[in-house]
Image: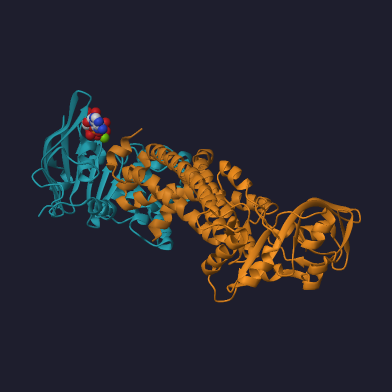
Chain colours: A cyan, B orange
Amino acid sequence: MALLELKQVTKVYQVGAVAVHALRGIDLMVEKNEYVSVMGPSGSGKSTLMNVIGCLDTPTSGTYILDGKTVHDDRIEQSSNGKLSDDELAFVRNQKIGFVFQTFNLLPRITALHNVELPLIYAGIHKKDRIEMAKEALRKVNLEDRMHHQPNELSGGQRQRVAIARALVNNPSIILADEPTGNLDSKTSREIMQLMDHLHDEGNTIILVTHETDIAKHAHRVVHFLDGLIASDELTPKGKG
Amino acid sequence: MGQLFESVIMAMKAILQNKTRAFLTMLGIIIGILSVSLMGTAISGIDEVFENSIQGMGQDVLYIQKYPWFMMNDEWWEYRNRPDIEEEYAEQILERASTIAFATPSSGRRSDVKYGKNAVERVEINGTTWQEAYISALKLESGRFFSEPESRYGTRVAVIGYDIKTNLFPDEDPLGKEIIIQGNKFRIIGVIAQQGKFLGLMSMDNIVTIPLKSLQNIFGGRWGVSVSVKPKEGVTVEQAKEELMFIMRGLRGLKPREENDFSINQQEAFREQFASIRMAISAVGLGITVLSLIVGGIGIMNIMFVSVRERTKEIGIRKALGAKKNIILFQFLSEAVIISLIGGTIGILITVGLVGLLQKFFVARLSIDLIIISLSVSVITGVLSGIVPANMAARLNPIEAIRYE
Ligand SMILES: Nc1ncnc2c1ncn2[C@@H]1O[C@H](COP(=O)(O)OP(=O)(O)OP(=O)(O)O)[C@@H](O)[C@H]1O
Ligand SMILES: [Mg+2]
């Protein structure tokens, strides 16, 4: 069975009188330990898809099944026990998914270390272990020396690395990264992609959004988006080989 | 557990970031708690003084007097025409009654009292007999009450109240000293123990007691008195009152259909009067308290809505990282409770300060119970006013919240 499965998923944003169709009926299946990159022009619905997959947003219609559990299904009532409850969704976001936001979404006024600690706090991990784990995650993104800085004291690339460390700190099995290298120089980008490759080798499932073909090549499969629909879905040379 | 602790820390940080705003929000709670604790202090103070003074009156004492203790303004004109209560009634009652143990006439006049250079103006000089000591359960701090022969001969001896002692004898033992009343020397033989006062409500502290005969001698002439009566052991006040009524009607020569032309007063009447004063204070205090707590609660609710709106993005991020509904709820609820608890604590601290000042004027003590009640009330107000905004925060959709600017 697929790790995650979307059937005819749509997302419509109502802006005043105008309805914006961000997703127009997506069918997508991702197996465990797949390495998928999502490409497509700006505004084509990539971030919207990531939010739905990451259980951060609910589709307007369609079905989403994650790890055998129904996250969303039009035909099932809100209160039905076939569907994940709010607290179960919080648990999934905390334990199963590591989400790297396109806009980082770090909390201001607290240090990088504390930002990375947050998922561990909500996982109920003890303070001492928590700090060790957070430091370890920052070490992986080469940011140990900046851990006591607040986000406004960090460069864009450094903030992005904090966001990545935060997504990895809980050892999630699914990593959803929305342009994780968008703000990084080529050297750091390479390091981050090495980290992604390594995480994939360890058995994790990775979905990443990118505009760069070089980055997309790290994945085994590329999904192309156009106007809220999947235009193509094919294996990369790496996937074939 | 760790998560809850974190939530409290975050709540405190949020408050510290907006100190002025938080303080202004607290004002309603401060005033509410101030009024509830001041009211409680006032009531327990009044209670204490009342019990003290009423003890001085003796629990079961009956007072035969021209006027009833409590009457309407216009009734006074009816009672004014009653004949005076005669001094002799006391002895006549004792001769005839089977339920009465003691009966004494007493009467009062005001006069300045001097000792050396010290003087107290317009002191209540109470004239009575030796039986007064057995009728009122007066506690003496030192010395003794006057004896039967001293009453009979009108010896110039005096028993003084605590305030008189401290005013006239700041650093001397008053026993055996002679004070001047209306140009006459009186030797002090006893001092009544302190009773405390509340807004000048009936207190023996400011009274000088002398034999009735001496009072008549120095002021010249006789006038109406009040007769205090104490029932025998094992007799109820009601039984004694019934017999007294019968004897008094005989002494006054009243026919069966005629109304009483005297009043028999008892402590009970004071209690009733006191209860209504107490009720009035409670009602006003409670009104102010409830009103300011409602205003304070609405203030907190308002500021919590603002706080939730300002931190919508933060809430979204926390939820995206796995914060459960209840954790978010708890975080904002604790912010509301902390604000109102700090307000309550400030209210109590101000009360403590005020009570310290007020103690100079009357008995005032802030009880632990009252502090606990006040703090609980603040917590409840915080929870009630925080629950709606906190719930709103907890229900936010993560991605919509993150997008909120
Ligand atoms: N909250 C929202 N309200 C209204 N419209 C929205 C909202 N979020 C996204 N959209 C619209 O949905 C469409 C898809 O947006 P999305 O963010 O998924 O694009 P994207 O592919 O990630 O683009 P980019 O490459 O620029 O990040 C866009 O047209 C956008 O304007
Ligand atoms: Mg995007």
Q: How many marks?
A: 0
Question: Residue B196 sits in which quadrant?
Answer: bottom right
Q: Quadrant of the N terminus of chain B?
A: bottom left
Question: Residue A229 sits in which quadrant?
Answer: top left
Give the residue at x 23% y 48%: A206
> Which of A143/A113 is in front?
A113
Q: Quadrant of the C terminus of chain B?
A: top left
Image spot of residue A91 (x, y percent) = 26, 54
- In the shown orientation, is residue A25 left or right of residue A101? left
- In the shown orientation, is residue B259 left or right of residue A205? right
Give the residue at x 67% y 65%: B90
Figure check: B394 above or below B140:
above
Image spot of residue A24 (x, y percent) = 12, 33
> Which of B388/B313 is in front?
B388
Please say whether residue A142 is visible from this viewpoint: no
> Which of B344/B110 is in front?
B110
